Image: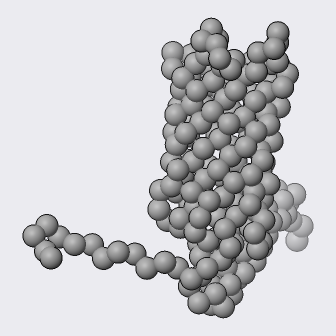
């Protein structure tokens, strides 16, 4: 009995998806058992390189470089900051900047790959000028993989300027300095009103 090419392709896709998930799960379980409840807790910061694209405009793409920092506390919201510039837009001494401020929630302890959803406010335009400037908001997600004090971050953000007809997409890679693994800090007990 011969197998169709679609069946073979489907089985290879299943293997290609499941195998990395099994490896990551096994590594995460092994690290978690050996870690005695250690987590990364502190600031993640480093250099970012990205690619900017505008919806519905195929040739509107540019490279962005900058710096970013995120307050990394497992499963708790933290401050997320970044400032990037787009060198191809330098004109007449004007320096184009794109700054974002928002919140990020690391969904993991930092032992294995960590997914970090983000949301916040964006401001962009030439430094020191109001002409051509805009304000908007973003939604995004990043993945962070760390070993010792060094991490690699990859992410994508959807950016929308207020009253703009098109959205921006920003794909970024970052080389980051991450906090070292340390014993988990105890959380303060919650108290109810009227309780001393």
**Quadrant housing residue 150:** bottom right
Is residue 54 at all visible to an observer of this figure? no
How many numbered dots are placed on residues in this image? 0
Image spot of residue 34 (x, y percent): 66, 91
On-image quarter of the C terminus = bottom left
Q: Position of 151 compared to 166: left or right?
A: right
Image spot of residue 117 (x, y percent): 56, 52
Q: Position of 48 compared to 78: left or right?
A: right
Q: Is residue 125 above or below residue 195?
A: above
Image spot of residue 93 (x, y percent): 81, 14
Image spot of residue 123 (x, y percent): 58, 26
On-image quarter of the N terminus = bottom right
Q: Is residue 170 above or below residue 68?
A: above
* Residue at the (53%, 26%) spot, across then down: 136
Q: Is residue 116 above or below residue 12?
A: above
Q: Position of 81 compared to 50: left or right?
A: left
Is residue 134 at all visible to an observer of this figure? yes
* Residue at the (65%, 77%) spot, across then down: 181
* Residue at the (70%, 64%) spot, across then down: 178
Pick the residue in front: 34 or 128. Answer: 128
């Amino acid at each position: 009995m011969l197998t169709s090419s679609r069946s073979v392709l489907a089985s290879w896709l299943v293997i290609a998806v499941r195998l990395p998930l099994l490896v990551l799960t096994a590594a995460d379980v092994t690290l978690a058992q050996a870690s005695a409840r250690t987590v990364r807790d502190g600031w993640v910061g480093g250099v970012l390189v990205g690619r900017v694209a505008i919806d519905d405009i195929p040739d509107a793409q540019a490279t962005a470089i900058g710096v970013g920092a995120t307050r990394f506390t497992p499963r708790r919201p933290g401050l997320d900051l970044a400032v990037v510039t787009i060198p191809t837009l330098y004109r007449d001494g004007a320096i184009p900047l794109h700054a974002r401020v928002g919140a990020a929630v690391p969904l993991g302890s930092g032992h294995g790959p960590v997914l970090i959803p983000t949301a916040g406010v964006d401001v962009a335009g030439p430094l020191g000028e109001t002409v051509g400037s805009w304000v908007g908001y973003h939604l995004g997600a990043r993945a962070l993989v760390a070993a010792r004090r060094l991490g690699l971050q990859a992410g994508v953000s959807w950016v929308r300027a207020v009253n703009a007809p098109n959205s921006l997409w920003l794909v970024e890679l970052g080389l980051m300095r991450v906090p070292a693994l340390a014993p988990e800090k105890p959380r303060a007990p919650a108290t109810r009103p009227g309780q001393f």
